[in-house]
Amino acid sequence: MEHNKNQAVMSENNNNNKAQDPNPRFASEGCSVLLDVNDGDRLVFARLSGGAVLKIGNKNYSLKPLIGAPFGSIFQVETGEDGSFLSRILPIQKESSSNNVIDDARDNRELIDNNEAQNLTGEEIEAMRREGAKGDEIIEALIANSKTFDQKFQLSQEKYKLKKQKKYAPKLLLRRPFARSICEAYFKKYPNRIGFIRVDALSLLLTMANVTAHSDVLVVDMVGGLITGAVAERLGGTGYVCNTYKGNSPSSVEMVRMFNFTDKIIERIVQSSIDELSSAKTVSPEENNQQGGVHPSTSDMVEDTLVTAEAKVVVDDVVPESKIVKAPKAGAKASKEAIEMWKENGFSSLIMAAQDQDPWSLAKDVLPLLSYSAPFAIYHQYLQPLATCMHNLQQGKMAINLQITEPWLREYQVLPSRTHPHMQMSSFGGYVLSGIRISTA
């Protein structure tokens, strides 16, 4: 009996652990996901729940089949007795053959686009759908009833198949939101919300600021929380990321919710104003000796109260469930002990991304908060404000190893006999000013 009782307790503890820390490789109910529709045609952020739906075309599809699926799964629209739904499909590996060689004997010069090449009518396609035909079967029927498909150039055939697949058999890729995928999605849809920070500029910021485990990183994040989330993701629950600001109200870091951070990581994200960090009490050596030289414990760095808020799922054709799904809110107020410790020891690094502020007006206030020899990285969309900031830092002898870097990222399409850079790509990713703080004495 005792053995069974212990076994039951262990099982209950395991269930509690699973509820608190779900497997990050699988999409669980209540977590944020990035939905990639038709290979990047649409990128949608959503919070999974039993009643959430996604609009594809003119129909709504339930996201319930996505719950419990591993990230990276592919779903396809299928039609059943109860209507259309999302069904998970397993990718089939295609055997390599000599068909990859482009056949130059055919071209499209003789083809006339008069909308008479397709024998299959819209009514017949709808009838196939009502009978339960899958999207792939409809595409094969369209190819078989096309008068000009066999005459098309091989690349044109592939484009034809892709076009029909997006219309009659749309696919959905379930992606995990993390720093890179979130940055890429926002850069593609709403680049102004993240200050036009490209993913290579984001990685350069983290590298130049030397963000490593157990670091205390000071950030000036005015890009929705992208920088704060990326730093917290790299820290992995160690150290602290402190979001500082001028005035009385901190900048919004709502984007942090998309990272699906555990409570352990959320507790390491705090905020404090520049005035509070600058005017904090400094512990003298005498007081430190009287206290036994004990520094405040890490458990006292953050308030014990966990702030929660309603998760807002108002993103691009996603209809939320009527039941409210709670999500932890990052950015609790930093404790007085933590502020005093940072005032005494300084932060280990700094990252600034303030698209609507002058870099120098912020840098002259936050750089003194760093420890000596601490690296910093400042992002701005334009070059001139960073050049002015760099000049003032040199004149004031506040930093060394100053340099302005323009990141450059070029993606290539790699396909048989047609490898080349992407035809549509961004040629601009902002600028990064980096350096190391030194003593002005």
Image (tube, helix red, strand yellow):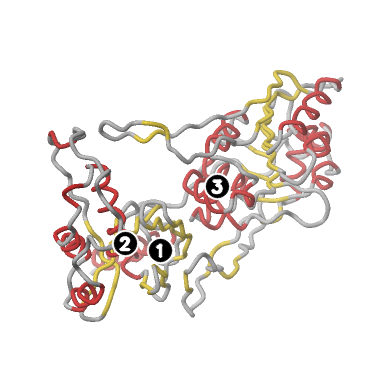
Residue 322 position, x and y percent, is 49, 80
Q: Amino acid at mark 3?
A: Phe
Work out whether 359 lies above or below 50: above
Please name which of the two marks, 3 or 2, marks the residue nearer to the observer.
2
Q: Is residue 13 left or right of residue 156?
A: right
Q: Which residue is mark 3?
A: 187
Q: Which residue is mark 2?
A: 170
Depth check: give the residue in front, 94 or 4.
94
Whether residue 167 sits left or right of residue 333 in the image: it is left
> Which amino acid is tagged 1?
Ala
Nearer the observer, 391 or 225:
391
Residue beneath the point at 20% across and 39% down: 106
Compared with 6, 407 (above or below) is: above
Distance in Å between CA atoms under marks 1 and 2 = 33 Å
Picture residue at 62% right of the left edge, 64% below the top: 307
Element carrying mark 1: helix
Give the number of the mark in front: 1 or 3: 3
Q: Amino acid at mark 2?
A: Pro
Which quarter of the rendered picture does the N terminus lie within?
A: bottom left
What element does badge 2 sit on?
Answer: loop
Q: Which residue is mark 1?
A: 19
Distance between the alpha carbons at the discs numbered 3 and 2: 23 Å
